[in-house]
Image (spheres, helix red, strand yellow):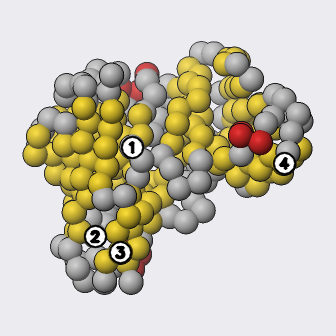
Amino acid sequence: SQTIHQWPATLVQPVGSPLSLECTVEGTSNPNLYWYRQAAGRGLQLLFYSVGIGQISSEVPQNLSASRPQDRQFILSSKKLLLSDSGFYLCAWTPEGTGAMGEQFFGPGTRLTVL
Amino acid sequence: SQQGEEDPQALSIQEGENATMNCSYKTSINNLQWYRQNSGRGLVHLILIRSNEREKHSGRLRVTLDTSKKSSSLLITASRAADTASYFCATDRGSTLGRLYFGRGTQLTVWP
């Protein structure tokens, strides 16, 4: 069976510090991968998605970047965090080739607080 | 920007009652999905309805889709305290790349 992991679960960082959040998927190959951010009391905003190693598409201009160094690993990074980067970060995956026709499977999320 | 807009933003009911949540969207779609989120947790998929479907059932869930009005509704029958969660609709905006665009959600509270 497939599982998705995110770490860390919670993170408190000062403004201006770097960020690295990791997401890994087990039990599948070449999944589509997604990063979302959820501000307090809000819906999810799609940040990045990837259909393969090294292939990253950005949905919104921002202070963040994403990378996919391995097939089942998706990294969300920032060189200098802003207060507005605080939120709940969720990683999700879909099986290769399912595109718009299938459900997304979400990880447990990382709660980021920037002080 | 948000794609879906759920209403109401918050809904409070007693156990045993039915809960109805609505979602409106603005673009063409291939499908519409509903997800549930318990506080501080990841999202769990509930049901997917394709653009050529009008109604779909799964257990105590009933979803309708009206593409002419660009709206959908999620009905939870005989609600339970364990149904307390936030419910989100999401659409693909017609894309086949698997990107989803979520609404702000409805916070459902079911009182025992």
Q: Quick check: B4 left or right of A93?
A: right
Q: Quick check: B66 left or right of A21?
A: right
User: Could you tell me how far apart the alpha carbons at marks 4 and 2 are, in whole angstroms?
Assistant: 41 Å
- Label 1: state its secondary structure: loop
Output the chain of dot 4: B
Of the residues shown, which amino acid type is indicated by label 1?
A: Gly
Output the chain of dot 1: A
Query: Badge 4 local density, few (<14 within 10 Å), some, or many (20+)?
Result: some
Q: Is residue B29 above or below residue A1?
A: below
Q: Quick check: B91 left or right of A84?
A: right
User: Could you tell me how far apart the alpha carbons at marks 4 and 1 are, in whole angstroms?
Assistant: 28 Å
Q: Position of residue A35 (x, y in %)?
A: 34, 49
Residue at mark 1 shares a chain with residue at mark 3: yes
Q: Residue under circle 2?
A: A63
Q: Are marks 3 and 2 in contact (CB under 8 Å)?
A: no
Q: Quadrant of the N terminus of chain A?
A: top left
User: Could you tell me how far apart the alpha carbons at marks 1 and 3 are, in whole angstroms?
Assistant: 19 Å
Which residue of the protein is positioned furthest toward the front in this rendering?
A: B112
Q: Position of residue B49 (x, y in %)?
A: 59, 22
Q: Residue under circle 1?
A: A107
Of the residues shown, which amino acid type is indicated by label 3?
A: Val
Q: Quadrant of the C terminus of chain A?
A: bottom left
Residue B90 visible in this rendered orientation of the protein: yes
| Disc ID at residue A12 | 3
